Amino acid sequence: MLTLGVMTAIGGFVDIGNLVTSGVTGARFDVSLAWAVALGTIGMVVYGEMAGRVTAVAQRPVFHVVRERLGVRFGLLNLVAACALSALALTAEIGGVALSLELASDVSYLLWVPLVALGVWGVTWRMKFQYMERIFGLMGLALLVFVVALFFLPTDWGALLSSATHPSVPASESYPTYFFYAVSLVGACIVPYQVVFFSAGGLEEGWTVDSLAEMRLNVLVGFPLGGILTLAIMACSAVVLMPLQVNVSHLGEVGLPAAVAFGKAGLAFALVGFFAATFAAAAETALSTGYSMGQYFGWSWGKWLRPTEAPRFHVVVLGTLLLGTAFVLTTIDPIKVTIVSVVLGAAAIPLTYLPILVTANDRDYLGEHVNGWFANALGVLVLLMMLVVSLVAVPLLLWTKAGQ
Amino acid sequence: MIFLTKRSSRGGDARVRAFAGFACTLALSACASPATSFDGYQGKVAASAQAMTGIVNTAWLAADSWQRHRVTSAYADIVVTNAERDAGSVLTALDTRQPPDERSIALKDDADQPLQDASDALTDLRIALRRDDHDGVSHAMQMLKHELQPLAAFTQDGG
């Protein structure tokens, strides 16, 4: 019942972007950026619920709504931006899966990349949607090792709480860098492909008005779970890596606190979690590109259809996978791609979320299920926050040289 | 029609110029900025020493965990190999910066040794780890610990 929310949380919320940015920020800023994760999580819950409601009641997926509300030309611009960002994110995710396998096997990640791409394609082509949700959702729960680890590490809970509730910029860091990482964290939490996948997944599962309670449970459990996992990774990084002045720049460093707490067993859980989160995210980003284009152009789309019944959808998914794989094989650093894709994604957020807010207020579509005043107030506040984030994202990326 | 073509062409040029400007800004932002004064160069040296301290500590933590059987050989090897590569990048980045005056050249000479020693110790650690040589790992870890002190001096005041 909760598997779509958990998978979206594991693969969309806690993907390579969140793993890296939470590890980096914990080691550099303690948990003083916890507020950014909280804001991102609230934003994702608010808009995930709206998109889910529009899907369940009006049977309208996100890019159908985008095209309808933004118009054909502006909608197309949004589609191109979303697909380009998904391809960039897919590059990072494939790299993330390969890096997880490298950490487990000591075999170069570049050798794993083609196999990972083949595996992701196999899952998107053959595996039933429900199996995909269950397998990766459950495997991804291995990341809870970071939550448990906090109780076994020499955690100063008072200091953590104080850092989270009294955010400040460490003396060794600058304000632009601090806000660059704040934007990165918010962007990593509310990446647009996440809401596209959640909404399309609802249609794959056959949601109707009767599924609203199930949808809300998915939103209220799944995304906050993703937020908790992100905060736990950040806190572990702050407890173990910050005192050593480690500047996290590889996935291997993010897993070290689990090993310090529980040895090889903890490490195994962390690696399984990294693998599940990045693999699920790779499948989600590839599928999201197919979903977005299928919904915009009015093609038949979805995993519930056999590939012969949705050929263009599957060609787009395969094409995106090939593009992402080729990009990783250029030996570009997947971690750098991650940081850039998260920030550029943050810049494009409002374009996807505004049409959802507008449609969620349309009585012709939603009848009695339109937004109430509370949902609208939260929606507008979150949208304003996204607007600020989107305006400052690229200037901060350039100013801080991607957070250096 | 001609007017439309002209307008479209101008619009295209503007878009190309905007894109080129954005690409140049992005490319320039990725370059290492030069130091034009001793203070600026001292800051670069301090940043390099700080980065190297973090790298050394990361490798030390991975090696210590390996010695106590808390991580696999594969994991420790990858973490230490990455640390060694990062150390090389730190050295290269500092080498490519032009010292602006005599004091800066002297500072660079002073900083080079501990940075290079730390990088060499990381190489020794990686070699010992891949050979499953516990004694070699212990020795390299001691070397790394030893390098932290001179690095700290540069971190605090740039030497």
Image (tube, rainbow, N blue to C red):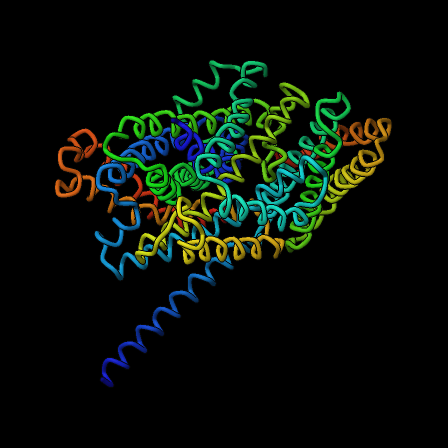
Residue B60: x and y in percent read: 72, 29
* Residue at left offset 59%, top offset 16%: A153
Q: Is residue B36 above or below residue A6?
A: below
Residue A209: x and y in percent read: 23, 33
* Camera-side residue of B100 and A38: A38
* Residue at left offset 44%, top offset 25%: A228
Where residue B7 sits, quadrant-wise, is bottom left
Q: Is residue A372 above or below residue A357?
A: above
* Camera-side residue of A339 and A325: A325
Residue A130: x and y in percent read: 44, 35
In this picture, residue A85 sits left or right of residue A263? left
* Residue at left offset 57%, top offset 51%: B37
- Number of numbered discs overlaid on the protein picture: 0
Residue A197: x and y in percent read: 38, 42
* Camera-side residue of B102 and A316: A316
Decide if residue A398 is in sight here.
Answer: no
* Residue at left offset 71%, top offset 26%: B71
Where residue A119 sits, quadrant-wise, is top right
* Camera-side residue of B67 and A391: B67
In this picture, residue A23 sits left or right of residue A76? right
Quadrant for the N terminus of chain A in the image: top left
Residue at the farthest bottom position: B2
Decide if residue A136 is in sight here.
Answer: yes
